[in-house]
Amino acid sequence: MTLAVALLRGVNVGGHHLIKMDALRAIFESLGVRNPQTYVQSGNVVFQAPERNLAGLPERVEKAIERGFGFRPSVIVRTASELNEVIARNPFAVRRGIEPNKLAVLFLTGNPGAAARGKLRALETSPEELHIHDRELYIYFPNGMGRPKLSVPLIEKTLETAVTGRNWNTVTKLAEMAAKLEG
């Protein structure tokens, strides 16, 4: 069994793309996933999958949601070990005064190339601070996430890949849920 987390983009935000979490769990179960557990209403699912290679799962989930609900959100999957690596790599972990509710991790569908990374680094992002590593972008929003200078659509356009973000509290909670499911 592979322990993993699925992150859906744009689900239940602003009254759009509504899906109840029990229905989302049912979709995962219909795809052969075991013990799907959701966290909050924004499309976070911790689960066990019988297959080791989860590369095809995001598209299967996207298609199932489209069939059942008439919209197709991007679905990004990380194994529990990958999520733990994301937590371990937090570039802000050693800094004092970092507020977890102002720190976000944007999970990317793909690993952008060097040129796209260079374009992102060239953007004026102050006061936000960002660090990109593989398929994750860490952003600290010292003034809060309500009106960021660096928007998700701009990030997606610059990196040429879809992303979905979770605040640090959610990232660590999902890792805790995965550990509990495993143990």
Image (cartoon, helix red, strand yellow):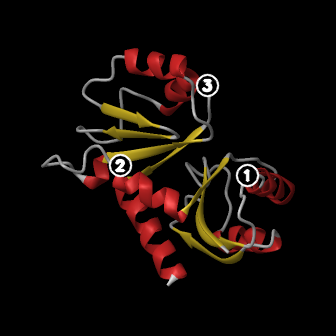
With respect to residue 144, does 85 lie above or below? below
> Which secondary structure, mark 2?
loop
Residue 160's disc number: 3
Percent x, y for residue 39? 52, 69
Q: Which amino acid does label 1 sit on?
A: Ala
Camera-side residue: 76 or 88?
A: 88
Residue extending farthest to the left is 96
Residue 55's disc number: 1
Q: Whole-Å distance between the Cαs marked 1 and 3?
A: 19 Å
Q: In this view, does 31 lie to the left or right of 82?
A: right
Q: Quadrant of residue 2?
A: bottom right
Q: Which of marks 1 and 3 is nearer the N terminus?
A: 1
Q: Which of marks 2 and 1 is nearer the N terminus?
A: 1
Identify which residue is drawn at 24% across, 28% down: 127
Q: Which of marks 3 and 2 is nearer the N terminus?
A: 2
Q: In this view, does 74 lie to the left or right of 70?
A: left
Identify which residue is drawn at 39% across, 15% down: 122
User: Which residue matches tag 2?
Assistant: 89
> Which secondary structure, mark 1?
loop
Percent x, y for residue 141? 29, 38
Q: Whole-Å distance between the Cαs marked 2 and 1?
A: 23 Å
